[in-house]
Amino acid sequence: MATLKAAAPRVSAALTVIRSRPYIPIVLAALLVLQPWLGVDQQWIRQTELVVILALIVSGLNLSFGYGGELALGQVAIYAGGAYITAILAEHGVGDMAVTGLAAIGLALVIGLLSGLPGIRLGGWALAMVSFFLVLVLPNIINQFPDLTGGFAGIAGVDRPTLFGISLESTNAFYLTVVILGIIWFVFMRNLVVSRYGVALRVLRQSPVLARSLGISVYRLKVTVYLLGAIPAGVAGMLFTYLDGFISPSSFTFSVAISILAACILGGKDTIYGPILGAAFIQFGPSNSESFQKYSLVAYGAFLVIFGLFLSGGVGELWRRLVSRFGRRTAQVLDASEFDADAAIPPLRGTDLRLSDVSKRFGGNLVLDRVSLTARAGHVTALIGPNGSGKTTLLNLVSGYYTLGSGTISLGDERIDGRSSHRIARAGVARTFQTPNIPEGLSVDETVESARFARHTIGILPTVLRLPVAARTRRDDRDAAAAALDAVGLGPLGTATATAVPLGTRRLLEVARAIASEPAVLLLDEPASGLDAHEVDELARLIRAVAAAGAAVVLVEHNFQMVLGASDHIYVLAEGAVIAEGDPATIRDDEAVARSYLGITTEPGTDVTGSRT
Amino acid sequence: MVTTIWAGLSVGAIYAIAGLTYNLGYIASGVFNFAQAQFVVVGTFVAYYAGANLKVSIVLAIIGGALFCAVLAGLEDVIALRPLAGSGLSGELITTVGVAVLIEGIILLVAGPDPQRVPYIQSDSFTLLGGRILPAEALLIVCAVAFTVILATLSRRTTLGVTALAAAENRRAATLRGVNVKALSLGAFMLAGAIAGGLGPVIGAKTFATFDLGDGLALKAFVVLAIGGFGSFGGALIGGMAVGLVEALSTRWLGDNYANIMVLVVLVLILLIKPSGLFGRRVERTV
Amino acid sequence: MTTVLEMRSISSGYGDVRVLWDVSLRVPPGEVTVVLGRNGAGKSTTLLTLAGVLKPYSGSVWFGERELTTVPAHKRPKLGIALVQEGKQIFKQRTVEENLLVGAWAAQSPRAARKDISRQYDLFPILAKKRSDLAGSLSGGQQQMVAIAQALMARPKVLMLDEPSAGLAPSIVLEILAVIRQLREQGIGVLLVEQLVDQAMSVADSVLVLDAGRVAYSGNAADASSRDLLKSLYLGTQV
């Protein structure tokens, strides 16, 4: 394991993923809570309240857009919903914030579901534009029901509420409520982002294909995150109504939506605390004084363009860069341990993978022509053939990324063809990719832990509340990841930035991740490409070990010598059909294979490698 | 009733024209340039200043609007769009929305929030097929149809057009065959800007020079392309007329507020039922 | 006029992933130069660097007396260098004829080249029958022919082909090899990247073998020892 171990000492702590302690946010929170008693004037109190309210809405956008990857400005509609329902309830005599708060959250979730379920399915541009349009249509909807909403004039005279019997009439009492609610939300948000959900979201953002291959239902995760992001918007609406006691359609315009987007981008769309910064900037800048108002559009536009082009991570990214530059600890020499050929790859419950008469067309081309093959549990089955012979298409069909033309694919006795790819992954099909698919922003540990997200689930509530069950699951994740990393010999690299390690190490990392998902079948897509001879040998040994642990290993590979050494059974594909199959010795001597795959005509008395038979 | 239809078709013509220019930009770069609608607004303001302040002829107003907006569009392409190539939805949407908001903000600063009358086309309505119609409205419909025909012919029957469509489909392959893809994109954007800006006097006669027209227009242009298909000029014409009619008829039968609401409903339906639009194929940009 | 396309000590790659390390090669006119190597060895990277799509980290590209290193990709076809990428990268939503017409863009005289479109139909008769069909509806082999014909419309002096045989039936591969021989007769320099060793060697004048981004072997195709070297490279035994 010399080459891979040689990588270990080179991994300096500069590559270590820095998970900062929230010292600054804690200090800020304390300051905010104490503000009224620090001799600050009334203007600041109100501005702070407005910043917190805006930050709540922006934070919801960060969740669904920055972390979830879907841009939808539904927040404004939900914000309006929260505000109006609070005002309407107040008009009907409901003055308890616990009740209106729950109503606002409830309405937020309803609007979120109605817009999110179809919206997320649309995704991309369609979702973004529909949500923009919804903002455009808000005033029309509000004005269409003037009896309920007060039409253009809005609703006035909303008194400050009571909370559990305590009146929030006074400035300080209401201020504290706003600040504390804000703090609670950001604590939840932080707990979510640093949990395994945060890891899953980063996987999702990197590549939905990768997420599905780990068993994550992309649709469900996106909708969940979208709904979560609706909650702070609804609460913000409620707080806004109580703040001035008055709302009207002019508070929920396209311009407001733009300011939310600008604040999100400015602070950094995939940060936890960015929204606070962005909201402060927007609130103290363009939205502030009368004379500034007319510059507000220009300012928003400029922020969006500049940050969109140059600093897409917003101020948050600047901050991260600063931290990583100055937060470097002295480089540690990491211990190189020997690869143990009997290293504990946990026993895997392998199942036979069977393809029967599988055919697939793309446009006019028949890419796979009635291919049948069996990959038995505990064995390494190799698939070789020239470019364009259909090998990768076959793997993608098994993974469920393409639909079958005809034929069947079964895992043991169960048919898996026709299932969605994340279900197939959950049934036990793990894979690696031709180019290692490693998400940004994760450590080696977390990359491997991500494999457990879909198989060992835990709810959102326990996660944000940091209940013991969540901590236990996290510990199990860590243990499983450590075991898998040890098995491939990467144990010492746990805290390194996953994307920073060399190619060979990344390939092993993918195998470790696959092992951590407790697969029945492991699909390897050209794992040896780009590796030198030593690395190829170690890889081959690892592949044999995984099969020995029980899984059915399918190896698609170009390196003929490696295939001969590592596999039990070989299928040769050419132009979409199986032209030969057998054990390595048989394939080595096979004329047809030599001619069509290698393009070599052998001399009589020699085999395909040129050695005498 | 026929009057309502004429009104709907003429608003639809504006949407169609906007849609045509969005299409041009989309074919050129694979990006839905949100800010395109702002060039229409700029065009109406150029026409306003030309007519009300400088008092020049309509020809000069058209040329001025076309040139000014062509330059603006070219600037946007070079500064904001090229660096974005391939960065995906979030980058493109945010930046083009940013440009749109920026332009709108500048218009607000320069011209103020009140709509201004654009003085070029006389406003005595006449009767056509049983309904009242303004000269500007008739002209709009004619222009929408004319430009659709021109652009469709240019793109399908000229070598330059076919090359542009090919480049939209596969940029690298086109580059390897000697096509300067960046120059083509720039040219298409500038043409889109020129058309939007040059029609200022005609469009402004109907809409007045209004600083915040662009937001709604951009969204409706998206609906137009969703209906007609991204990349299809004929589809943009039909989509535009459809949206205009939906607005006019909903206002007449259901009430003012329902115009936008019904268009939203149509958008959602189209996206759920036939996302590629009636005539379009999504021109996927491959590297 | 002997214009040789040359790569001198090129190091190239994608972003910070270096693929080629100090690679030099020559493509003389009227000869077929074959590049062999395993997947990931850098064959496509070589072609893309020669075509100007990839900017090299160091080294230079020359065409005759002219240094091409800073010439942008879209200007190189006009100078006479054409690359046919792997994967049949034609314009599938345009007709066959439209595809060929686009190919004429880089010719010295595009108008004349377009009028001369019948040359391509002579070379690839099947395309004449399909001229008004959408290119995407053709079979894999036919699409490959469109790709080559499209590049030939500009009358290139050097034609680079990246794995033209991928996914094609052996009979079509033979047809393409025949076309390559014809092009050689016409004085065009051909740079052929291939997986199928024997087929490629059947048309090769010289051969270059890449291994992990470096030149492992470079010499005449007629040289007997090259065969064993090539085989061992393919079979993954050490070089």
Image: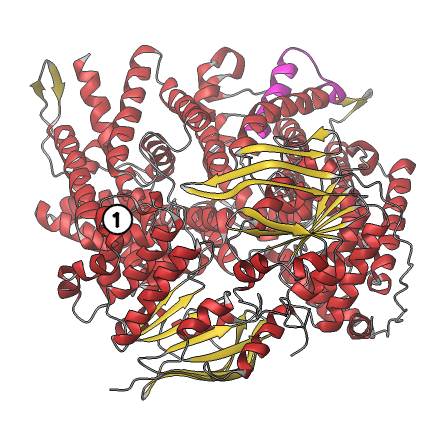
The three-letter code of the residue at mark 1 reads Ala
For residue B129, above or below residue C194: above
x%, y% of residue B82?
40, 59
Q: Which residue position holds label 1?
A: B192
Residue at the far front in the pictured view: A605
**Front residue of B84 and C129:** C129
Q: In which quarter of the image is the N terminus of chain B?
A: top left
Q: Residue at x 66, y 57 (%)?
A: A587
x%, y% of residue A259?
52, 43
**Front residue of A205 and A152:** A205
Q: From the viewer's perspective, tell me whether residue A171 is left or right of residue C95.
A: right
Kindly tell me whether residue B5 is visible in this rendering.
yes
Q: From the viewer's perspective, tell me whether residue C161 is left or right of residue A166.
A: left
Q: What stretch is highlighted in magenta?
A: A76-99
x%, y% of residue A95?
71, 17
Q: From the viewer's perspective, tell me whether residue A430 is left or right of residue B264.
A: right
x%, y% of residue A24?
78, 55
Q: How many marks?
A: 1
Kindly tell me whether residue B117 is visible in this rendering.
no
For residue C227, above or below residue A523: below
For residue A67, above or below residue A327: above
Q: Does A81 appear in magenta?
A: yes
Q: In which quarter of the image is the C terminus of chain B?
A: bottom left
- Give the prevailing secondary structure in the magenta stretch: helix
Identify the chain of the residue marked 1, using the numbered disc in the image: B
**Front residue of B262 and A428:** A428
Label 1 Cα neighbours within 10 Å, binned few <14 / some 14-19 / many ≥20: many
**Circle 1 SS class:** helix
